[in-house]
Amino acid sequence: MYYVYAIYNPKHNKFYIGQTKDLDLRVMLHNDKIFTKSYTAQFDGEWVLIYREEVKDRKSALIREKQLKSYRGREFIKSKIPR
């Protein structure tokens, strides 16, 4: 099982869309800035999970991630940001 997810940083009003096999670990890694050159490491503040979707395999996760990174997908994710 894989997850496609979106995390949000309220301090900077930024979001990130990704895919992983271990969602809890991945969110922790984003918050701990383990990937020092990643997009999320540029911003201080906490990243919170705002959307997740289970898919059966990595191929499906990559396809869905690409859909969510499209214009319509980003609009959908923006609707999930807490106001």
Image (cartoon, rainbow, N blue to C red):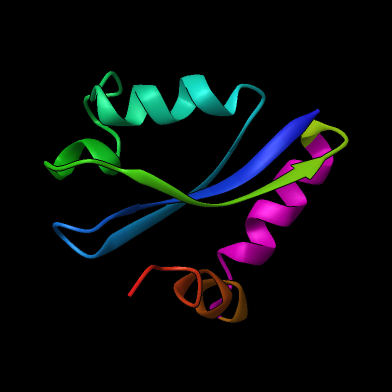
- Where is residue 82? Give x, y as percent: 38, 68
Q: Residue furthest front?
A: 83
Tell whether 27 sits left or right of 64: left
Location of residue 3 with respect to 78 vertically, above or below: above
Question: Which contiguous range is marked in magenta?
Answer: 59-71
Q: Position of residue 39 (x, y in %)?
A: 29, 43
Q: Is residue 59 left or right of residue 29?
A: right
Seen at 36% across and 45% down, the residue is 48
Q: Main secondary structure of the magenta part?
A: helix
**Is 27 part of what is drawn in magenta?**
no
Vertical side of 59 occupied by 23: above or below? above
Q: Is residue 37 left or right of residue 72?
A: left
Question: Which residue is drawn at the image coordinates 57% and 29% (left, top)?
Answer: 23
* Quarter of the image where the N terminus is located: top right
Residue 68 lies in quadrant: bottom right
Q: Residue at x 47, y 26 (%)?
A: 26
Residue 60 lies within the magenta run: yes
